[in-house]
Structure formats: structure tokens, C-alpha cells
Image (cartoon, helix red, strand yellow):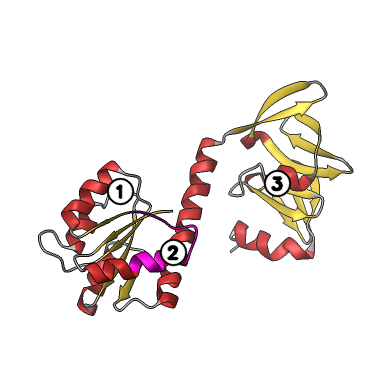
Amino acid sequence: MNCLVVDDNDLARLTLKKLLSLDPALVMVDECPTADMAYQTILNKEIDLLFLDIEMPGMNGIELAKSLAENSTMIVFTTSKRDYAVEAFDLNVVDFIIKPVAPARFLQAVKKAKGIYKLRSQAENDKVQEFIFIRDSNTVKRVRLADILFLEAQGDYVKVVAEGNVYQIHSSLKSVEDKVPKSIFLRVHRSFIINLSKVDTVEGNTLIIDKKFVPVSDAYKATLNKRMRIL
């Protein structure tokens, strides 16, 4: 993740830069002593995560955060003033850290930010991915993800059962699982992955999808119930 450190205190910026080096996934893009400079930096560079002080000359951190309300940049406030906590969290920031910033507390905030970043990336990928290409014999066909009912492992092959069609591809089920969006598909058995939106009925350890029966193993049942949001 691309990071920007904003603080009018030189020592505070140096401390955060050292903390950023604790996680190789964090890339220090720039540092700014004022919120005004930070605003211009964010407009011109791709910043994923902003470590932002609040009390600074000119525009303060709260004002900068408000100006970025339509921006996807995640914000972690780093401040010595607890009084701003309620206002800060009203801005839907990732975290609010009181100075001096301890390494463990810093990494806790980073973990939250990485979780949000991962979810956003997954959602973006799922939005873009509306279909997959399937090699069936010597022909490559485009199949809409919304048409797929379930996937079934059969030895060295995977059977793709879609609405009105069945395809046979030479692959492992794990390989296929890695290529389809997890927001749509869920493994329910060592040999089956289903399209959650296609489930008609759940009867014990069996799913009925378009009048076809799909087994659910005990190892996956809790996850299935959670994803289906059964009332």
C-alpha cells in the first residue's frame, strides 16, 4: 500500500517512517509538514493510506479528512489530543492513535487498513469479472459467471454445470476456485463449489440447485450458513 505521512513535527514524521519499515507491504511515497501540501500530493499521486496529524498550521487534519470524503484514501489519525476522537471516527477513518505511537499499536492500525484494502480490491475485481473463458475440447467459450450453477471435481477434470450447458475442463478444483470471485462462489465440499445465488433449498447436508443435489460436508457447513445469512 502506498503511504503518506503528514505531520508538522519533524521527529513525529521520522518515527512514522521508521514504523512503516516494519511492514514490507507499506511503501513510503512521500511526507508532508502541512495538510495543504498533503492535499496536493494526494491529488497527484496514488495514496492508499494516510497517517495524519490533526493540529497543524493552516488546514488541520480534520479539515483535510473532510476534504477527502469522496476520495478512497484510508486515514489513520496520529495525534496527542484525545479530544478529537469522536469527530475523527465520525469521518469513518481507519483508526485513531495517540502519540507517542507504539510499534504494536501502529501495526494494529495497519492490520485494519490492510483488511479494508483487501476487501476493496476483491470487490473491484468481482465488479469487473462478469464472465470466464472455458476451454471445452478444442474450443474456448465465454461463460457468464451468473449462469454457472456449480462446479464439480471429477478426477483430473472439473465439470462446470451452467444453465442449459455442462462443460468439462482439464483442471483441479482448487485451480478453478482461485480464478472465480469468492463473493459469488463458495466451496461446500471437497468436490463441489457452488454459486451461492443459485441455491433453492437446503435439506440437512444437501443443497438443491436447479433440481440438482449437491452435498455439503460438515467442514464447510458453518461457513455456508454464515454466507447465506440464514434467519
Question: Callout 2 environment at 10 Å: few (<14), some (14 to 19), or many (20+)?
Answer: few
Residue 212: x %, y % from top left: 79, 43
Of the image marks 1 and 2, the number of the one nearer the N terminus: 2
Residue 77, above or below 4? below
Residue 121: x %, y % from top left: 49, 48
Label 2 sits on a secondary structure element that is: loop
Residue 160: x %, y % from top left: 77, 36
Which of the 4 image quarters holds residue 203? Answer: bottom right
Say which residue appears at 58% left-offset and 60% top-offset. 229
Label 1: which residue? 71
Say which residue appears at 61% left-offset and 44% top-offset. 181
Of the image marks 3 and 1, the number of the one nearer the N terminus: 1
- C-alpha separation, residue under disc 3 versus residue under disc 1: 32 Å
Say which residue appears at 34% left-offset and 76% top-offset. 101
Q: Which mark is residue 21?
A: 2
Quick check: 189 left or right of 28?
right
Q: Which mark is residue 177?
A: 3
* Amino acid type indicated by mark 3: Glu
Question: Callout 3 environment at 10 Å: few (<14), some (14 to 19), or many (20+)?
Answer: some
Quick check: 142 left or right of 76?
right
* Amino acid type indicated by mark 1: Asn
The stretch in magenta equals: 16-29
- C-alpha separation, residue under disc 3 versus residue under disc 2: 34 Å
* Amino acid type indicated by mark 2: Ser
Q: Which label lies toward us, 1 or 2?
A: 2
- C-alpha separation, residue under disc 1 versus residue under disc 2: 25 Å
Say which residue appears at 63% left-offset and 36% top-offset. 145
